[in-house]
Amino acid sequence: MMNEPPYWREPLHEVFTVTVRSCIKEKKEYLIEIAEDVIRAAGGGQDGDRGILRINGQEVSILNTAKQDSRLLLITEEPVEPDQVVQLVIDLKWRKAMMQNHTAEHLFVATMKKISPSYKLGYIWIDGEKGVVDIMGPPLDFETVVKAEKEVTRLIEARIPVEIEIVDAAELDDEVRAREGLASKHEKVRIVQVGDYDSSACSGTHVFNTYDIEAFKVIDYRTVEGGTRIEFLTSSRALEEMVKVYNTTLEKKHSYPYEMDQLGDILDKAKELIHERQWIVQHLSRLMTEGKNIESIENTDFWTEYLPGLDMKEVRSIIRDYPMEGKLAILFFLPGVKSSLIFWTNELPEDASHYISDIVTSLGGRGGGSRDVYTGGFADSPNPEEIYNEIISQLRKRLTS
Ligand SMILES: [Zn+2]
């Protein structure tokens, strides 16, 4: 017959009388062995319980609980006299948070299995702050993560009872999620059932109803070897995090200003600006060390610059004070989602358009100009650098002929 620890069926039982067997100092901590199996040690991917020991009106904090060779050890900062009976009080705040996080983990993994049975559970860690779980298989994209998150929220709102059953390991059927080799290690196995949504072999602590999880939020997902690591929060911890993130953006909303649903676009713009700035720094450093990007083609100075982050007006003002003397061909290219360019000539036999107009048109752009200036643009230019290089290479040929 298997001994069922009390926290399996009554995880909210708070106070126990326990016997201290021994107390050993290990580094800065004390390991206090107790006789009764009433507090859950770390194991099976779940952190240990916290709590306090009450000894003659004195309180000793339990920092964590561990199991070593089937001995149950309380980890404390202070020693406790062995061979005495003391009161053990479970930290129910920590315990409840683990119950919420662990049950949410069951719901998330079961949902992933329903999305595709090929997904397998990898690494798992549950404590009183958050849950971490690796979903092994093809990397999860954002849409799938959000879909699973939504389903977990639906299950929480559906108020599904969570029940515990102890069964013979030999009777485990394929419907029950269980780690490989589990049935061969144990005679009896504890099954955690979430209605008829999920059955899973597990020794952790769980809530009584999915509604007790209160809230679920994935706070990160990233690719790890062989799968995707998901980090999540539940209950008040999820709400606090969401409030924190929302208020960070709310504080800035009026000073910038923007609407909340524009946040994604704003982040994209910020990334683009950083990229442009890197270009400008590179550009500036080249200008300062090597000078302007000028080559000489048959007595014509051919000057080309790739200028991200600048607009047409700014570029015109840069060139305004440039001394236009001798034979010149100057191309400034302003890359972006919509790229534009300006081409100046001086003392060349033909109009500026003569040299560049066909090139721009053949690359999908349009433009026009006067004797010495041509301006053009590309409505859609996913690869502006390619367009820029192509224009230069064709202009070289035009200037030669
Ligand atoms: Zn579990």
Image: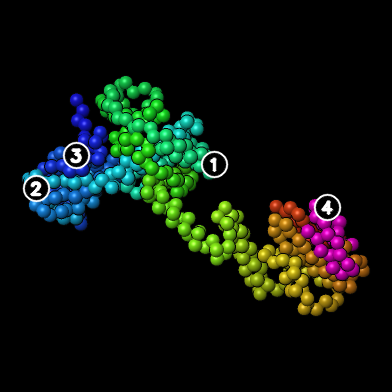
Q: Residues within 10 Å of mark 4 (few under 14, many from 20)?
A: few
Nearer to us in this view, 317 or 281:
317
Q: Position of residue 228 (x, y in %)?
A: 47, 42
The alpha-carbon separation of the residues under discs 1 and 3 comes to 42 Å
The alpha-carbon separation of the residues under discs 1 and 4 comes to 39 Å
Residue at point 74%, 74% (across, down): 318
Three-letter amino acid code of the residue under disc 1 = Glu
Q: Is mark 2 within 8 Å of ligand 1?
A: no
Q: How many marks?
A: 4
Q: Residues within 10 Å of mark 3 (few under 14, many from 20)?
A: many
Does residue 137 appear anywhere in the picture? yes
Which residue corresponds to mark 3? 38
The alpha-carbon separation of the residues under discs 3 and 4 comes to 79 Å
Where the C terminus falls, by quadrant?
bottom right
Q: Residues within 10 Å of mark 2 (few under 14, many from 20)?
A: some
Residue 359 lies within the magenta run: yes
Which residue corresponds to mark 4? 362
Circle 2 sits in a helix, a strand or a loop, which is it? Answer: loop
Which residue corresponds to mark 1? 143
* Magenta segment: 354-377
Q: Earlier in the sequence, mark 1 or mark 2?
A: 2
Three-letter amino acid code of the residue under disc 4 = Ser
Which residue corresponds to mark 2? 82
